[in-house]
Amino acid sequence: MLTARQKYMRKYNTKYALKNKKIIQENARLRRIKNREKYRAYDKNYYWSNPEFNRRRWRKYSRTHRAQINKMRRNRYAKNIDYKLKCIMRARFLSAIKNKQKKGSILKLLGCTIQEFKTHIEKIQLWWIIIRIHPYVPHRLCCITVGVSHF
């Protein structure tokens, strides 16, 4: 049960918050900037301790912003060669996994990083134009290296 004083203060604080909303928001923003590391640690802890909340939030965001997400992915695919290789390899190896030929992640199957893979292709003089024209040339090479057949 609240006392008369507590009731009064609750009512006063509500009015004050409505009247000074901009000032309160600015103070909160400055406090976050001043204590950036503290808030970053709190946010990180909250993120990892509430996975279901994050999943729901991402699902809702991805449904409402589908066109924007697709546009960003297409743009990244067109401009970032590492991302493009990763997507192509993921799709290629996914087909191998679905056919139950090989199991494991792309980089484990490949046996090196994306950068090392790019360097390897450059060494054997397959120019990056070939990737744009015929994207499956590098996969045949890496699949031979890994020992996956039927590509």
Image: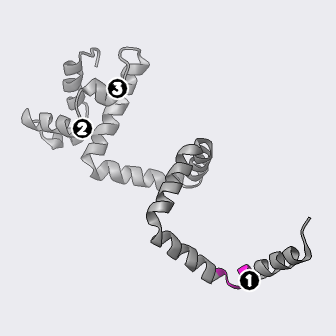
The foreground one among 25 and 122 is: 25
**What's the image's color scheme?**
one colour
Instruction: Identify the secondary structure beneath mark 1.
Output: helix
Relative placement, left or right, of 106 versus 28 is: left
Residue that appears at 36% across and 27% down = 105
The answer for how far apart the CA atoms under marks 2 and 3 are is 14 Å
- In the picture, measured across the screen, residue 130 lies left or right of residue 105, that is left
Q: Position of residue 64 (x, y in %)?
A: 59, 54
Region in magenta:
16-21
Residue 62 lies, in percent from the top left, at 55, 50
Q: CA separation, marks 1 and 3?
A: 60 Å
Q: Outermost residue, bottom direction?
A: 19
Q: Which mark is residue 93?
A: 3
In the picture, the disc for residue 114 is: 2
> For numbered disc 3, what is the local secondary structure?
helix
Identity of the residue drawn at 59% across and 46% down: 59
Mark 2 and mark 1: Cα distance apart in space:
56 Å
Name which quarter of the figure residue 95 lies in: top left
Majority secondary structure of the magenta segment?
helix
Report the label total. Answer: 3
**Amino acid tagged 3:** Phe
Rendered-image quadrant of the C terminus: top left
